[in-house]
Image (cartoon, rainbow, N blue to C red):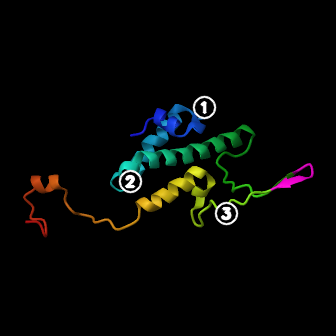
């Protein structure tokens, strides 16, 4: 399982422990392992969990910033697509980086990356109920198709 140090090494944008406390990162790393299917993710489990953690820590950081200025924490905000001040205006088109139907995963670059990877991990069928070699060796059950 990835550690807080592994996470900070892979995602140096989260190196400020005052903004991104170790306890919070550890919480999401631990929860992420429980929510990801180890068999599907295989060698990419740590990377997937770290992306998932980065997404959630980023959302939590935004909530804390909202609370600090008296706003309701956790309020959903979409991507900024336009802004103006003192006669100067600009806007961004984030549609090229966003996935239609991806919901809140589009709120951070980490969520977009995690979802893309998760879609690959979820591709293809999964056969349920097939015993492992260990289960076969330890069982007297006559599994269908196994001699």
Q: Check residue 96 in the rendering and tell me which mark sits there, or answer none.
A: none
Q: Position of residue 59 (x, y in %)?
A: 61, 46
Give the labeled residue for mark 3: 95
Check whether the beta carbons of the residues at disc 2 and disc 1 lie within 8 A of each other. no
For label 3, count other residues whose C-alpha is less than 10 Å away and answer few (under 14), some (14-19) or many (20+).
few
Give the labeled residue for mark 1: 16
- Which residue is depicted at the point 92% across and 52% down? 87
Q: Position of residue 50 (x, y in %)?
A: 48, 44
Question: For this view, does 85 lie left or right of residue 59?
Answer: right
Q: Quadrant of residue 76?
A: bottom right
Residue farthest bottom in this picture:
145
Residue range of the region highlighted in magenta in the rendering: 85-90
Q: Quadrant of the C terminus?
A: bottom left
For residue 122: magenta? no
- Which residue is depicted at the point 51% across and 45% down? 53
For label 2, count other residues whose C-alpha is less than 10 Å away and answer few (under 14), some (14-19) or many (20+).
some
Q: Which of disc 3 and disc 1 is earlier in sequence?
A: 1
Q: Quadrant of the N terminus?
A: top left
Give the labeled residue for mark 2: 41
Q: Which of disc 1 and disc 2 is earlier in sequence?
A: 1
- Which residue is depicted at the point 54% across and 54% down? 113
Main secondary structure type of the part rendered in magenta: strand
């Amino acid at each position: 399982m990835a550690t807080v140090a592994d996470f900070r090494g892979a995602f140096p944008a989260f190196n400020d422990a005052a903004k991104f406390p170790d306890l919070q990162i550890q919480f999401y790393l631990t929860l992420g392992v429980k929510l990801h299917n180890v068999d599907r993710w295989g060698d990419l489990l740590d990377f997937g969990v770290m992306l998932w953690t980065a997404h959630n820590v980023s959302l939590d950081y935004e909530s804390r910033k909202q609370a600090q200025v008296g706003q309701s924490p956790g309020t959903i905000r979409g991507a900024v697509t336009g802004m103006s001040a003192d006669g100067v205006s600009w806007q961004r088109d984030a549609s090229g980086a966003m996935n239609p139907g991806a919901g809140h995963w589009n709120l951070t670059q980490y969520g977009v990356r995690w979802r893309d990877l998760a879609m690959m991990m979820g591709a293809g069928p999964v056969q349920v109920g097939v015993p492992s070699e260990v289960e076969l060796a330890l069982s007297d059950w006559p599994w269908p198709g196994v001699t």
